Amino acid sequence: MTMIYDLLAGSWTYRSFVNQAAVLPELDPEHIVTDDVKKWSGYLFGQGVMTFHPTVTGGLTGVFEMGTDDSPLDMHLNGKIEDRDGTTWIKWNAHGLPGTPSDGWLYEYDAFYTPTWPDGSNQIDAIVGSVVRSQTHGDLAPNQTVDRAALRGSTASFIMVRPAFVQARDVIGLPPELLEMMGSRHHRLHHAIWHGLRDNWVTPGDGDISENDKAEIRKLGWEPPHPNQRPTRGTVEQRDPDNGAGEDFLYMHRQMIQDVRELLGAHGLPMIESWKSIPTPNRRSRNRDGFSVPQTWDQGKGEGSNKGLAMVKSDEYWHSRMTFLERKFKDPKYLSTLTLDQLGAKIEWLIHNLMHIRWCSIPRDPKTLAPVPGGRPPEDTSGKWIKVESENKPPVYYDDLNDTFSSHVHPVFWRLHGWVDDRIEDWFAAHAAAHPGQVTRKTVGGVPWFAKGAWVSVEAPWVGPTCAGHGAGGHAGGHGDHEHDGQEHDGLEHAAPLHAGHEHGGDGHGGEGHGGHGGDGHGKYDIDAMQRVYDLIFNPKAVAAVADASAPAARTVQFTGKIFRAEPQAPVAGVTP
């Protein structure tokens, strides 16, 4: 198996210990715990936090943070990673920073990544090894409890353990009002089936939705008029570049952003700021800004999927791929050559899906918090994946960024999609300069959009069923609690957008900001119909057997599933726009 070096990425808590009998204190077997604590400083050699940035070819860079805020002793790391008979070995040097108290320091490290015990439980990643001081430097005081000369040749053994990664929700968490809206069953089902229908309606080679199931979906009003078509290097038979799917992608998420802006405004809260640029590589587990890249993990879907996940999270991917795409999608000359549909399709498949993957973390069961490496089972939409409440604790909303059922509950989602939405305005500005008057603004379904024309192919982009008296949205009307296939569904309502110039009556949803809408406002789709459509796509066991569905197709709610196959195959992430 090929090494997945990204398993080492991130922060590690480091402690080293002297190996000299004269320094190590004698321990009293009768009071070993007490004596061990009292004499700790006698054999502690050094401590700090090392953050590794491994490369896909086995190189290693990083930073070693030591000392205090007043007297930092940080060092740069450089080294390599090797696979020796199935064991991961790491060799690296730590160099002091010029012009700082660590200037002139040099340490060498040789270590290995501890293997996982087959029958072990709750095992924490660890690296163990030995370090040697390669250059003499000044006394270690005042950063060490015991002053001693830092002589060349001094050695120590060390252990490094991976601290818990601080999740984005704990740093830049969404306001409770937004969590309640976006974490509702209604919004989860809508986001998952909107993506799922577009992705699976026409999927050559992957297995289409059966004709019987499509017929039922049509009766429920959920047939996607513009099925998703991936930008491939193949022939036009595989992809029609102007079928409207790209416009649907951009419009639907712009509508979501507008709904959020209005909800937050109604509560006196500021709008979540979008990324102006895609964040630079940051692997620190403390995640102080919420944008650190979480480490990779084994999803249990084969080596190809593991390598793909690690590649997208790597520093090289940001430097070689994401920076290139960001420049392209901000380049007026390039944007002026694209239709709005082409812009949406390229952004969705070439960078948006990969940003979801780059910033996703290993999923955890919302009730037990145990890791779920493969993610939420797609067929399971039970209450725990909606909201888990317990006494004296905030509610838990499942927010896996890799799952369309939950990605919009993750705080990075709104920074990421804010970046995507800003590219629409760049596109409009590019066409206004290159093709004056050929693209005109128009409000569609209460959302600022563009009139159909030479560069815009769809009159009203698709976000779901269209009902009489409404525009691109759905119908008004409240829905209470429902039972579906033995699963209890919550009755959380969709917070209707407060579009300027619309009348908000009281014949629809109850509560502040939840009234029915006149004109072309958006309301709440029927949750029973959405659950049925979801099951037809992702839970074939829950629906009646049909003659032409002898082998249900493997369909995924995961962004990784769209990009990387379970079997070892080359990912499509390198497609050039």
Image (cartoon, rainbow, N blue to C red):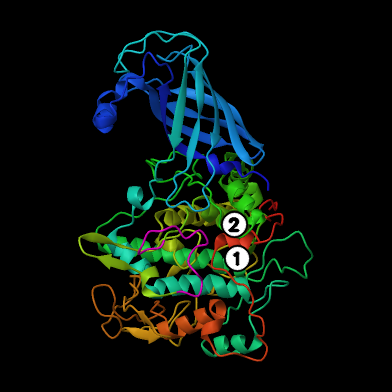
Residues under labels 1 and 2: Cα distance?
A: 8 Å
Tell me what residue is drawn at x 49 percent, y 43 percent: 279
Cβ–Cβ under 8 Å for marks 1 and 2: yes
Q: Main secondary structure of the magenta part?
A: loop
Q: Would you say residue 428 is visible in this rendering?
A: no
Depth check, front residue: 86 or 367: 86
Q: Which residues are magenta?
A: 365-380
Identify the residue position indicated by label 1 in the image: 246
Which of pointers 1 and 2 lies earlier in the amino acid sequence? 1
Locate residue 324, reporting x and y percent: 63, 43
Q: Secondary structure at mark 1?
A: helix
Residue drawn at 28 percent across, 26 percent down: 28
Where residue 200 appears, x then y in whole percent? 62, 74
Q: Is residue 400 visible?
A: yes
Percent x, y for residue 445? 45, 74
Among all residues in the image, which is located at the extreme front? 30
Towards the viewer: 462 or 493: 493
Q: For mark 1, does the 10 Å Cα neighbourhood hold few (<14), some (14 to 19), or many (20 or more) residues?
A: many
Does 373 lie within the magenta span? yes
Q: Which residue is mark 2?
A: 347
Percent position (x, y) of residue 11?
45, 37
Depicted 108 relative to depicted 445: above or below: above
Residue type at numbered disc 2: Ile
For residue 260, side relative to residue 113 (left or right): left
Crowding near the residue tagged with mark 2, few <14, some 14–19, many ≥20 C-alpha atoms within 10 Å: many
Residue 137 occupies quadrant: top left
Query: Relative to 333, is 515 above or below?
Result: below
Q: Quadrant of residue 202?
A: bottom right
For badge 1, the amino acid type reads Gly
Q: Quadrant of residue 547?
A: bottom right
Where is 209 relative to 150, above or below? Answer: below
- Label 2: element kind: helix
